[in-house]
């Protein structure tokens, strides 16, 4: 009985081993799963190569575009009753200049604003001079054509904080850059590649 059991087991094992598939040769990949432009869409589905990384895309990797029309507050603080532009803020103005160089058909309006301290007329001149300080820097230091620059002072007509605290006065002494133009830019979004890019926060 015992020899018979051993023979049966050996026969079963030999039958199983004949169905084992080895991986000695590489298998062919049916679809191209690579993503050359890092937009999150595999090559097998890609219809628009070289999409800007981080652009808002459809299921086929084609990006969406939008006209340039944006407002950004420059983190530039002026001292009370002053339009002196401290060089420590030049970096922010340079970023704006680089954006304008990238999109040469854009124009910018620099808005100057003041806190509600002193007369309206005095603050109107002061806010205009603050806006002029930014446009002068854009033109003279960073080479942006004056024809693309407009400076407007609003006195204290448009406060971001209407209270009369020292903190409110400081916040209201500010400049806003409004960039518009015929250029278009990619509509950006988060994706798996941009999660660590702090500039898209």
Image (spheres, grey):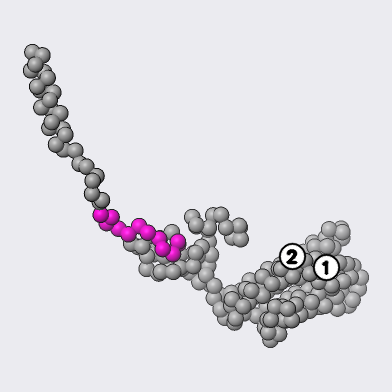
**Residue nearest the observer in this picture, 101 or 169:** 101
In the drawing, does residue 121 fall left or right of residue 154?
Answer: right
Residue visible at 19% across and 38% down in the picture: 20
Quarter location, residue 123: bottom right
Location of residue 146 in the rendering, given as x and y in whole percent from the top left corner = 71, 85
In the drawing, does residue 88 fall left or right of residue 198?
Answer: right
Quarter location, residue 93: bottom right
Location of residue 41 in the rendering, given as x and y in whole percent from the top left corner = 40, 60
Q: Is residue 33 magenta?
A: yes
* Crowding at mark 1 (Cα within 10 Å: few <14, some 14-19, many 20+): some
Q: Which mark is residue 132?
A: none
- Quarter of the image with the C terminus is bottom right
Residue visible at 41% across and 69% down in the picture: 49
Q: Secondary structure at mark 1?
A: loop
* Crowding at mark 2 (Cα within 10 Å: few <14, some 14-19, many 20+): few
Residue visible at 40% across and 69% down in the picture: 48
The residue under label 1 is 78
Q: Is residue 55 magenta?
A: no
The residue under label 2 is 75
In the drawing, does residue 43 fall left or right of residue 158?
Answer: left
Separation of residues labelled 1 and 2 (CA atoms): 10 Å
Q: Is residue 112 visible?
A: yes
Q: Secondary structure at mark 2?
A: loop
Location of residue 8 in the rendering, given as x and y in whole percent from the top left corner = 10, 23
Q: Is residue 58 visible?
A: no
Location of residue 79 in the rendering, given as x and y in whole percent from the top left corner = 86, 67
**Residue nearest the observer in this picture, 114 or 183:** 183
Magenta span of residues: 28-39
């Amino acid at each position: 009985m015992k020899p018979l059991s051993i023979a049966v087991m050996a026969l079963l094992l030999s039958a199983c081993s004949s169905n084992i598939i080895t991986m000695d040769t590489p298998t062919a990949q049916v679809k191209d799963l690579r993503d050359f432009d890092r937009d999150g869409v595999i090559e097998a589905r890609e219809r628009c190569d070289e999409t800007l990384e981080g652009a808002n895309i459809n299921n086929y990797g084609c990006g969406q575009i939008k006209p340039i029309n944006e407002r950004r507050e420059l983190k530039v603080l002026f001292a009370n009753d002053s339009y002196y532009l401290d060089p420590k803020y030049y970096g922010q103005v340079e970023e704006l200049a680089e954006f304008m160089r990238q999109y040469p058909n854009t124009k910018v309006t620099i808005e100057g604003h003041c806190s509600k301290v002193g007369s309206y007329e005095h603050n109107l001149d002061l806010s205009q001079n603050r806006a002029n300080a930014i446009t002068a820097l854009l033109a003279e230091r960073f080479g942006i054509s004056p024809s693309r620059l407009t400076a407007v002072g609003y006195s204290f007509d448009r406060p971001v904080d209407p209270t009369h605290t020292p903190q409110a006065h400081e916040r209201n002494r500010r400049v806003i850059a409004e960039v518009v133009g015929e250029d278009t830019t990619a509509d950006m979004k988060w994706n798996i590649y941009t999660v660590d890019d702090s500039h898209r926060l």
